Amino acid sequence: MSTLAHTMMTAARSTDSGLAGPGELDRYPFGEAPVAERVGAPVWESAEPELGRVGRRAAGSRGRGLHGQLVQQLGQMIVSGDLGADRPLVPEEIGQRFEVSRTVVRESLRVLEAKGLVSARPNVGTRVRPVSDWNLLDPDIIEWRAFGPQRDDQRRELNELRWTIEPLAARLAAGHGRADIQQRMSDMVEIMAHAMGQGDALTYSRADAEFHSLLIQVAGNRMLEHLSGIVSSALQVSGGPVTGCDRPNDASLGHHGRIVDALAAGDGTAAETAMRALLTVHPEVERVVPAPREH
């Protein structure tokens, strides 16, 4: 195993990341974590007096403190429809009910405004905006939709975008001859193979995400690079209709390996074909993203 592959596997098991340490790989089966552990259920469910407070270790806070936790809570509630369009958001009321300072509320609403979820106007106040105004490519909104009532639509849309983005990226990447990045991609496949053998789903998913990020990077198209977050988010919220990246197996590994081989050979057609095969390695995907018709 290359030095890079060994380094990444060691880093992936650090205590800060929550991944397995030496000798603990078999602790992590391939089963998906419960939704409640990933996102956390909204606690502010109505305008009743007894509303939830922001916990200092709320699920989904990602270590971002009270500000991040409040963004997470309010964002989930808006996306889930608990706070419907044009619903007024009164900062003083939010601060009291979630037991946070005015500063935390103000900064949280600014973040949500940047995501297109709310708008603040003089003499009108802060209100929830309709779905048509949301930044649907924002990673947080993708996650909130993927684990809320819109989960099926979100995962279908992500798979459709991946079908559009990644085969093109694979074709373009084959013409750039970046041996250093191709080697890193090969390392990721090696890590994935080792992790699958050990039953270490978290290390596998981390290497898989890195593989796809590198592929888009080497494609040499800056606009595609700006869409790389979509692919990362799609891998993180895998579920529903599955692709070859969602259920580690020999077929999936084989397709990843063939992509690397095609890049090394400068064969754009083979790279694109292997990526399409990877994205449809499970028949369920065909109901979501049908294969292109032959003319």
Image: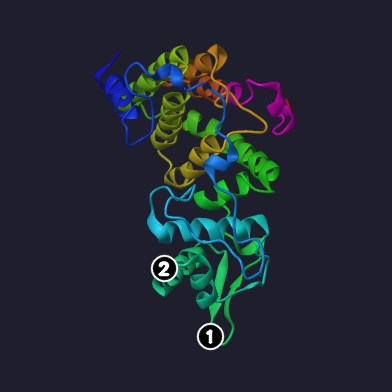
Mark 2 highlights which residue? 104
The magenta stretch spans residue 281: yes
Q: Residue at x 68, y 59 (%)?
A: 81
Quick one: 115 or 66, which is closer to the camera? Answer: 66
Mark 1 highlights which residue? 122
Quick one: 263 or 275, which is closer to the camera? Answer: 275
Image check: 282 left or right of 110?
Answer: right
Q: Residue at x 38, y 19 (%)?
A: 24
- The image shows residue 281, relative to residue 121, as above or below, that is above
Image check: 20 left or right of 274?
Answer: left
Q: Residue at x 36, y 24 (%)?
A: 182
Query: Is residue 218 among what the camera can see?
Result: yes
Q: Dot 2 lies on which element? A: helix
- Disc assigned to residue 87: none
Instruction: From the top left corner, tell me how far across and down residue 263 is, in percent.
Output: 42, 22
Classify the position of the C terminus by image quarter: top right
Numbered range of the magenta stretch:
276-292
Badge 2 amino acid: Val
Image check: 256 left or right of 32?
Answer: left
Badge 1 amino acid: Pro
